[in-house]
Amino acid sequence: MLKDFLPCLAMVLVQVGYGMMNITSKLAMESGMKPLVLVAYRQIFSVIAIAPFAFFMERKTRPTITMKILFQLFLFSITTVTANQVFYVLGLENSTAIIACALNDLLPAVTFVLEVFCRYENVQIRTAAGQAKVIGTIACVVGSMLLSFYHGHTIDIIGSSIHWKYAEKMTNSSSNNETNFLGLFLIMLSCVAWAVGFILQERLGKKFEAPYTTTAVMCFMASIECTVIGFIFEHRISAWSLSSSVRLFASLYEGIVCNALAFCLVTWSIEKKGPFYVSMFSPLSLVIVTILSFALPYEKLFIGTLAGSVLIVAGLYAVLWGKDKESKLSKSKGDQKYDLELQAGKINDHLTKIEDKLDPVSS
């Protein structure tokens, strides 16, 4: 019982952490913190948090880091970390926490489309798994279009009296809290960058069997990349100040909890239950964000937002189910092939023994 409960608890905590990240990011940016500065500090604090794990837990098992591996990690840091998080936080600045979190669930569908486009995966439309992935992808696209182009009436689930007073103070009257197409486009770009990183990680070279070291090196590279990008667009030293409590908390929280701690929990859960189990919890962060966002005075839930989110989550589960079905089928075929080869080997051995017995007789 406890063995099944702990991975579930770990993934719930991870999704709660990710949900809180959207709220803390919005509050930090409403207090005047620039999104690129926030991303840079997130990588810096994540390196400080994850480096001790990489050093102490993998110092005896860590393979040699070659130039080829460093180059691959550089590509992963550019796509999976820097581009993904820079586009996401810029999109979040021009959108709402609910819509940003919902669009983030497009990742499996985007990965599937890119793999088909690059001919890394066959659609297999005649199979139930292939049909599920195609239908799920279409549902995700329709859901994202609803989020982008249709709002409808506002859904008043909870009254505005619960709005967090601190959030009201952080929100200035000149802030742009409306969702625009640029914000939606940037969040979709973050999904594309993340998907490209996944494909690169799967296709390039031999896997580097040191996950904590891999994350530490990637975050270190990303911290340099994000800091350079941040200074290019934001020269003022005052913009990098962490004197504000909400800016300091957001930077520490996102670096330590959402990067370092979340990675450790996700890695452990994958080892215990597998990647499909971990992916099943992804929509939970959308529920968390929807609940927590009522603390922000400018967050509103529209009919179009709700309908689009439901379609995206349904599409996500359809794509995940199709991938899991294909994975099990492929494994089953592999086991059958192995059994046939094993039986063929035994038959050959038996025939060889018969021939050895017949040779003296024939001579």
Image: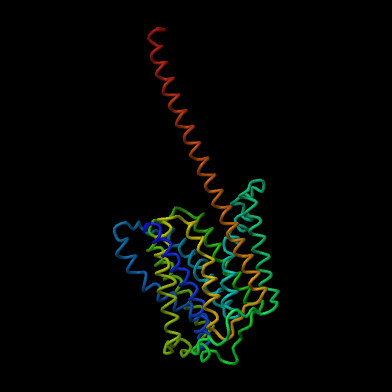
| Residue drawn 54% across the image and 44% down it | 329
Q: Is residue 124 left or right of residue 272?
A: right
Q: Nearer the viewer, residue 191 or 167?
A: 167
Measuring from the top left, give residue 124's x and y in whole percent: 64, 47
Quadrant including the N terminus: bottom left
Measuring from the top left, give residue 53's x and y in whole percent: 33, 66
Q: Is residue 45 left or right of residue 167?
A: left
Q: Is the residue 154 above or below the residue 208 in the image?
A: below
Q: Is residue 318 left or right of residue 240?
A: right
Total labels: the figure holds 0
Q: Is the residue 341 above or below the residue 63 in the image?
A: above
| Residue drawn 57% across the image and 54% down it | 321
| Residue drawn 39% across the image and 18% down it | 353
Quadrant including the C terminus: top left
Measuring from the top left, give residue 18's x and y in whole percent: 48, 72
The colour scheme used to paint the residues is: rainbow
Measuring from the top left, give residue 349's x and y in whole percent: 41, 24
Q: Nearer the viewer, residue 227 or 37?
A: 37
Residue 272: quadrant of the picture: bottom left
Residue 243: quadrant of the picture: bottom left
| Residue drawn 42% across the image and 60% down it | 269
